[in-house]
Image: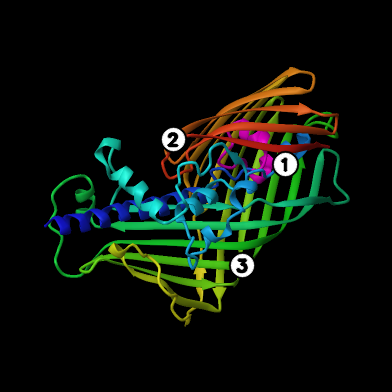
Amino acid sequence: MKRKTAELAKIATTVVALLAFFALFARAAGAQNWDFDARTIGLGGVSGSGTIASGMIEHGAGYRSIVLPFGLLQVLPDLEIYDPDSTRFDPVRAVEHAASPIHFIVGRDDDLGDGAFATTIATARFYADPANGGASLSPRLDLGGIVAPSWGTTIPLRGARAGRFNGIYVGAGPYVTVRGSADLDPSVLAFIGGTPVDFPAGPGTIISTRAEEQVALAVTGGYRGHFSWAADAATSRDGWYVAVNYNYLIGFGYLDDTLAIRVGPAAVDIDRVSSSGGRGMAVDVGVGVVVGRWEVGAGVNGIANRIRWTDVSQRAIGQGALLSGGLLGAPGVAAPHADVEVSLPIDVRGNLAYRADGWMAVGEVGHGVAGTLAHAGLERRVLPRVDVRGGLSYSFGAWNPTGGVGVGVNRRVAFDVAAFATNANFQRQRQLALAASIRLMR
């Protein structure tokens, strides 16, 4: 009886670990800490910010940002932790690093032991322990996110009338998406919560998960227009802003990993469907209005988005006896698989800003594949070339504070730093993160 209880306890704690793994991975893909502009982050925009039309208005106000990716110094030294075929594969560290790879996190990896997969089990036991609040799970989890920045230029069109600007946008950037889901047997939830449970003696699946990732290049062509109604139309920011992007997606990598944990006997199976080539599209639309000091805008990203992956293969990544401590075995032989077409929910955003002499306030709300997002912030000029910022960011049901400072080196260059709280870690504890970027004014 004690042996059976110990077996179930180990299964349950492993379930918690794997659920947390998939939940955190999807959370990372929600772009929680993937904004590259330290000024925006200081204003609360940790979870990504703006529509393509609001980007026009901001750039019209005068700058572009170059990120200083100090976080890569923390996440790149040990590449084996990201490889499921390596003995050093560590899903805890791999997922935490993916959650915030660009910015420097104080104390990153301090509590993750020696980098072995056993750390996952130990962390799961922490959460399952009632003294630490117990496990907080639901029978069904659906999470996901997208990171799709674009860098490019706008080519003005000739023949525009006074008060109007028309241009063709040409650019490119990465297009990375992740979706995750998990189904958990209600009896496992009850067991983790401390309720006595009689598991069936025969074979059965107590948890199944799926994680789907896409990596592609977005080659973008689009339209940019500004229609002013002001008397000094040639210099005024007032008016309508319209932006449209057509993104041609060139896929480089597709992974669809499924995991099943079974009892009778206790075992784990991991299978992978993958491809290294695909083609697709997505359309982004945004509009904005500037009236004096006020700005308001709305946008929809990812309209009709899809990628069709070809030359798809399927293989078993690993099979193992759960209680023997080994999750991964020798990979199976790849077999042909039918083509796969992937599409994601659209992303809808709305934003509001007020610019005064020496200060500004911004806010944004949205909803998409990563759920509901929001942020708000203030910026104040305290010295001729020094701005201070503060804000709040909401994502995945939690508010986190942000702050920052911008220092102008000269009229064309400024240096921005930001500090923000992030809970993109296995323990869901707030950690201090630092972002830095260079601002190039027009």
Task: Please name whichever residue, 314 or 392, is drawn nearer the observer in this view of the structure.
Answer: 314
Q: Does residue 143 show up magenta in the picture?
A: no
Amino acid type, residue under disc 3 in the picture: Gly
Mark found first going from the N terminus, 3 or 1: 1
Query: Is residue 162 among what the camera can see?
Result: yes
Q: Residue at x 78, y 54 (%)?
A: 168
Give the answer, above or below, for where 21 lies relative to 267.
above
Dot 3 falls on a residue whose secondary structure is strand
Query: Mark 1 sits on what residue?
Result: 56
| Residue 286 percent coordinates (x, y) | 64, 46
Alpha carbons under labels 3 and 2: distance apart: 33 Å
Dot 1 falls on a residue whose secondary structure is helix
Q: Nearer the viewer, mark 1 or mark 2?
A: 2
Mark found first going from the N terminus, 1 or 2: 1
Query: Mark 2 sits on what residue?
Result: 398
Task: Please name whichever residue, 37 or 121, is drawn nearer the observer in this view of the structure.
Answer: 121
Please tell me in which quadrant of the rendered image residue 283 appears: bottom right
Q: Which residues are magenta?
A: 36-57
Q: How is the image coloured?
A: rainbow
Amino acid type, residue under disc 1 in the picture: Met
Q: Residues within 10 Å of mark 1 (few under 14, many from 20)?
A: many
Give the answer, above or below, for where 312 lies relative to 31.
below
Q: Which residue of the protein is positioned furthest toward the right in this rendering?
A: 158
Alpha carbons under labels 1 and 2: distance apart: 30 Å
Query: Mark 3 sits on what residue?
Result: 251
Left/right placement of residue 125 relative to residue 4 reads right
